[in-house]
Image (cartoon, helix red, strand yellow):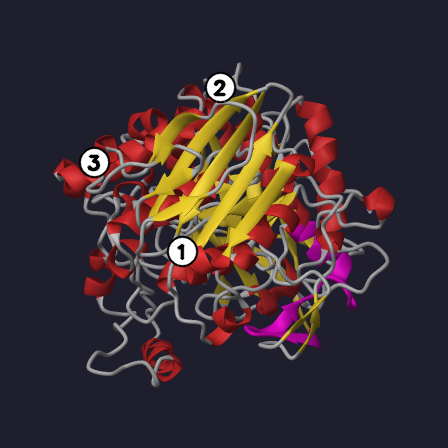
């Protein structure tokens, strides 16, 4: 089933030619009217699919409204574009066509060129707004980042939240500045040569302010997820729920000029229908692209190691353009000393990192002791651009009890090794805000629910989750504002020489990645690894017709001499222990092999 791609058809939409169009889906309700904040009531008419509609001839931009159901209570619009008074307040009629876009000449980058930078709007700057992010774009551009990945901005309860508790998928968070400010940010990014990736959540909604079931069967008991009932994409009434998701996706691309969407936990979208919802989303993305002439990408978070999610529909896939690989992160973390407990227990230091460099998935049909079953399938035919890798992200940092970053968990040398390992990969690299200068502030879990019972449940749940890890410390209170403020970046750290040295390493690595064709061309057929277990070292080799690049990693605390057999002279490209990067030990050198300082990495080049 295909839906309109050129304009919004759900919610309250302002048009130049037809007036203000009102559409709300409530197929099981007997009567629905729109009520303006001043008390004005307008009748809606029901169509055969359960959509209640009317046309308001006068201009009502800026007016607030709710819908009254069956002559009783009033509720915000499920397709609200703006909730200036929060999740329980009135929706505001908003004209997204008012923004005068300045990005006419913008063209999205080829996916394989993305250098991603994940950020949380509320903690990225002291102000915590979209406009404040604009003030940091020159910094990001200087670093070499060309794509920011913005954590969810759909309206959530209160002012503080990671964004995964959003309950109005169409509304832009009021405390960040609302929809007009987000349009300004995207426009500014494009003028600076930076793409925008937005994190969206279609697999569940948060608990507070979730009024969808008041209107219609948006959820189903047919399946259950960690968040409760599943979003209804294949049960009775699912056609219109699928439309709700697809139109939301198109909203971000078309009306906010977003370049890519990161889809949260796509494995939790339970769909056994003939056409998976993700495939339908890809089809509508391609259709919109054919209309606008712009490329858009869908990148999934998936916990299944199943290439079906990223394969094209013609070979039985769902068609996502790419996915995150948590397994690369896990393998890298145990290589630098993370304790092998929980899901880390499945990963072998260095050997599994080498496997991920070559095979993407570590568990690709192998038996997983942690899961106690054979897991995953092979991604041999997938391209490097289809995978996103990282050493930190919001989940892997924030879901630790204290939200510690790598900067307080590992040595300065190992932090530089991790940076090199991520940026050396034949995949899309992603940084988590602040890691490029060794941010030491934690990134902790925070919420600002206004429902007292729910707030207490979240507190208790967080403490229970980490009851075996407390020791002398308690899990931070997610409701305490200090948890949020403690998670803000400390930009003053950049003035410190070690932090600036770390920043300089990231900037240099990104520049070199763009400069060397054998590096930035994500050809998975030209990748080899050598694991030197006793030496706690790894060699990654990537090449093309003109050059061969060798990435040497020493994860151990002892100097290592790594034998290299070749008939060509090797030229040093980079050493993480260089004084430029605040190195403190002797740099690597080549003489019948590569001598590496403890906890360091070096890159050498051979001309072919």
Q: Nearer the viewer, residue 264 or 414?
A: 414
Q: Residues within 10 Å of mark 2 (few under 14, many from 20)?
A: some
Give the numbered dot on residue 279. none
Mark 2 vs mark 1: which is more N-terminal? 2
User: Please, which residue is most extreme toward the front here?
Assistant: 592
Element type where label 3 sits in the image: helix
Q: Is residue 156 magenta?
A: no
Element type where label 1 sits in the image: helix
* Residue position for label 3: 500
Mark 1 vs mark 3: which is more N-terminal? 1
Circle nearer the viewer, 3 or 2: 3
Q: Is residue 68 above or below residue 588?
A: below
Element type where label 2 sits in the image: loop
Q: CA distance from mark 1 to mark 3?
A: 23 Å
Mark 3 vs mark 2: which is more N-terminal? 2
Q: Residues within 10 Å of mark 3 (few under 14, many from 20)?
A: some
Residue 283: horizontal and vertical position, in percent?
76, 40
Displayed quadrant of residue 589: top left
At x 57% / y 64%, what residue is drawn? 204
Q: Which residues are magenta?
A: 221-245
Q: CA distance from mark 3 to mark 2?
A: 33 Å
Give the numbered dot on residue 103. 2
* Residue position for label 1: 394
Residue 134 in the figure: left or right of residue 303: left
Q: Is residue 605 above or below residue 20?
A: above
Q: Is residue 560 above or below residue 89?
A: above
Q: CA distance from mark 2 to mark 1?
A: 29 Å
Residue 31: horizontal and vertical position, in percent?
65, 64
At x 82% / y 47%, what residue is drawn? 1
Q: Nearer the viewer, residue 151 or 347?
A: 347
């Amino acid at each position: 089933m295909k839906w309109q791609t050129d304009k919004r058809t759900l919610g309250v939409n302002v048009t130049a030619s037809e007036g203000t169009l009102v559409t709300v889906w409530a197929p099981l309700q007997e009567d629905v009217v729109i009520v303006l904040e001043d008390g004005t009531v307008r009748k809606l008419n029901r169509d055969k699919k359960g959509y209640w509609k009317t046309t308001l001839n006068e201009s009502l931009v800026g007016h607030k409204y709710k819908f009254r159901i069956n002559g009783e209570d009033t509720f915000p619009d499920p397709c609200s574009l703006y909730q200036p008074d929060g999740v329980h307040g009135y929706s505001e009629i908003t004209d997204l066509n008012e923004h005068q876009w300045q990005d006419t000449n913008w063209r999205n980058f080829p996916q394989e060129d993305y250098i991603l930078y994940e950020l949380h709007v509320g903690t990225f700057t002291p102000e915590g707004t979209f406009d404040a992010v604009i003030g940091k774009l020159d910094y990001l551009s200087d670093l070499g980042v060309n794509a920011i990945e913005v954590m969810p901005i759909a309206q959530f309860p209160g002012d503080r939240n990671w964004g995964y508790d959003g309950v109005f998928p169409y509304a832009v968070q009021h405390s960040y500045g609302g929809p007009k400010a987000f349009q300004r940010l995207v426009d500014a990014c494009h003028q600076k040569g930076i793409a925008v990736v937005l994190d969206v959540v279609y697999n569940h909604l948060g608990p507070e302010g979730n009024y969808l079931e008041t209107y219609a069967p948006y959820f189903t008991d047919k399946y259950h997820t960690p968040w409760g009932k599943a979003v209804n994409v294949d049960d009775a009434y699912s056609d219109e729920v699928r439309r709700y998701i697809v139109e939301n996706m198109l909203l971000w691309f078309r009306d906010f000029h977003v370049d890519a969407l990161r889809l949260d936990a796509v494995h939790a979208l339970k769909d056994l229908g003939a056409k998976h919802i993700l495939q339908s989303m890809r089809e509508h993305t391609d259709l919109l692209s054919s209309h606008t002439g712009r490329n858009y990408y869908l990148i999934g978070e998936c916990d299944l190691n199943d290439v079906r999610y990223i394969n094209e529909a013609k070979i039985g896939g769902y068609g996502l353009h790419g996915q995150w690989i948590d397994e690369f992160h896990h393998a890298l973390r145990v290589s630098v000393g993370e304790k092998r407990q929980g899901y880390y227990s499945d990963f072998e230091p260095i050997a599994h990192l080498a496997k991920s460099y070559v095979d993407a998935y570590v568990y690709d049909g192998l038996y997983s002791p942690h899961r106690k079953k054979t897991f995953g399938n092979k991604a041999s035919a997938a391209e490097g651009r289809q995978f996103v890798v990282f050493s930190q992200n919001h989940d892997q940092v924030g879901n630790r009890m204290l939200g510690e970053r790598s900067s307080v968990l590992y040595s300065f040398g190992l932090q530089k090794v991790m940076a090199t390992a991520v940026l050396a990969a034949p995949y899309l690299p992603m940084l988590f805000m602040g890691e490029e200068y060794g941010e030491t502030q934690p990134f902790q879990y925070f919420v600002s629910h206004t429902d007292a019972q729910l707030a207490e449940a979240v507190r208790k749940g967080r403490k229970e989750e980490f009851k075996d890890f407390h020791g002398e410390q308690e899990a931070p209170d997610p409701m305490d504002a200090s948890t949020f403020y403690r998670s803000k970046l400390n930009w003053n750290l950049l003035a410190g020489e070690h932090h600036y040295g770390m920043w300089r390493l990231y900037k240099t690595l990104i520049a070199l990645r763009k400069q060397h064709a054998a590096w930035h061309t994500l050809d998975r057929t030209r990748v080899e690894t050598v694991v030197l277990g006793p030496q706690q070292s790894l060699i990654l080799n990537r090449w093309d017709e003109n050059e061969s690049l060798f990435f040497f990693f020493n994860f151990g605390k002892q100097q290592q001499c790594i034998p290299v057999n070749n008939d060509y002279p090797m030229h040093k490209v980079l050493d993480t222990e260089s004084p430029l990067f605040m190195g403190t030990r002797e740099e690597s050198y080549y003489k019948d092999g590569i001598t590496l300082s403890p906890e360091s990495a070096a890159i050498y080049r051979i001309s072919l």
